[in-house]
Amino acid sequence: MSLNVKNVDSLSFAGKKALIRVDFNVPLDEHFQVTDDTRIQAAVPTIQKILNDGGSAILMSHLGRPKGGPEDKYSLKHIVSAVEAALGQKISFASDCIGEEAIQKAAQLGAGQVLLLENLRFYKEEEKGDEAFAAKLAQLGDVYVNDAFGTAHRAHASIVGPPKTLPSAMGRLLQKEVEVLGEMRNHPKRPFIAVLGGAKVSDKLGVIEALLSTVDALVIGGGMCFTFLAAKGMPVGSSICELDQVAVCKRLLDGSKPIHLPEDIVGLNAEGNYATFGIRLPEGAKGLDIGPGTAAAFTDVIMDARTVFWNGPMGMFEDPRFAAGTKTVAQAVADTKAFTVVGGGDSAAALAQFGLDDEVDHVSTGGGASLEYLELGDLPGLAALRGAPNVR
Ligand code: AMP
């Protein structure tokens, strides 16, 4: 399926002010220093392309989860020096993403210059997709570029609003993400397996159903495995288990595609002590990681595949006692000769924690966005770009 979305090479930016939606939702330490600038670096190729063309860049992003008004700890002023370091040039900052200051600073921008706007989520209108708010953002630029893959599955104002009036394109990061995920979704080398983990099965049922029509096998660990084990009639003790999803899991297990589930479990016994269990958990026991036998079996499946998609940790890996399953799976994803894609969020964090992030073919910058793209083959952010007007 062709994306049918313009990219930055199909627009001319000379003399234009480009309003660019980036995802600079980066982690900060207690001194407001950026501890991981991956997301800033990921947007540099798009910004540089626009500046090299003789355009200027107005960057807009969210940071954290403010409650709908300004909060100093979520101010994007804290990341100005990190953006300057990534771009190798000074930038200016507007202390409000809309209004007089932003309008003036945007108007003053010359070719090759960059303006960063304050956090979009200081307005509750952003997440509501408010059209009037989006129009105020759009007023700042001549063209719009979306390079915020991690937020492209949200119909937020800065994602779907500006393309209604401005000529628009996807940035290089968004383009690369959807090309890699699209190729994997539509033309995978087989066997294609998906390894899914994470806490809740209900969050991922949509993508599990969609993947079952594409993959050759599913591998399921993490908290979500207990709902599947319950569907097979296994006692799961006091592990997280979504009883209202058991029937759906049973239907999926009865389907034609193999679903690999754990055969041993690591967790806490009823007394709260670390223990390894078989597949039937005693009363009061809580499963918090896949066991060593399961990790070895999952490794075999991953090593035999030619395409692997991995999303979600195999256990509560933030606790070192329950990180072994996730570490073994991460190592297998790093070692396999298969084409490997890791779908953002916790699995990307786990890979980085184990120093394996350079060992896979693609680490997506969006957890939720990569799952939604695999499920639906499209994102609200892409659909919005498709509807944009032509260059004036
Ligand atoms: P998700 O956001 O759905 O990908 O879930 C990630 C979270 O699931 C991580 O914080 C893990 O600690 C947690 N998790 C994984 N396995 C388990 C488990 N067996 N029990 C409780 N939490 C888990």
Image (cartoon, rainbow, N blue to C red):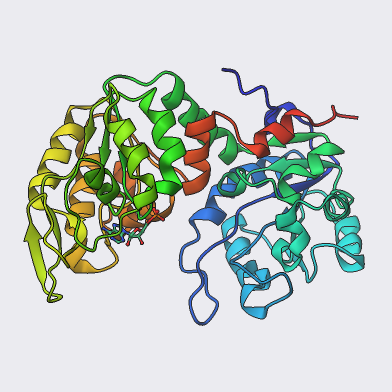
Q: Is residue 225 left or right of residue 295?
A: right
With respect to residue 33, does 117 lie above or below?
above
With respect to residue 74, does 289 lie above or below?
above
* Residue at the (25%, 37%) spot, across then down: 219
Q: Is residue 167 left or right of residue 252?
A: right
With respect to residue 225, does 275 lie above or below?
below
Q: Is residue 197 left or right of residue 264?
A: right
- At which x and y percent is residue 54? 78, 42
* Residue at the (46%, 37%) spot, across then down: 206
Q: Quadrant of residue 100?
A: bottom right
Between 153 and 234, the one lying in front of the other is 234
**Quadrant placement of the N terminus:** top right
Q: Quadrant of residue 155?
A: top right
- At which x and y percent is residue 267? 16, 63
Quadrant of ligand 1: it is: bottom left
* Residue at the (12%, 69%) spot, across then down: 269
Between 26 and 263, the one lying in front of the other is 263
**Taking the image as drawn, is residue 3 in sight?**
yes
- At which x and y percent is residue 292? 9, 51
**Quadrant placement of the C terminus:** top right
* Residue at the (38%, 23%) spot, across then down: 214
**Taking the image as drawn, is residue 366 in sight?**
no
Between 346 and 198, the one lying in front of the other is 198
Between 250 and 208, the one lying in front of the other is 250
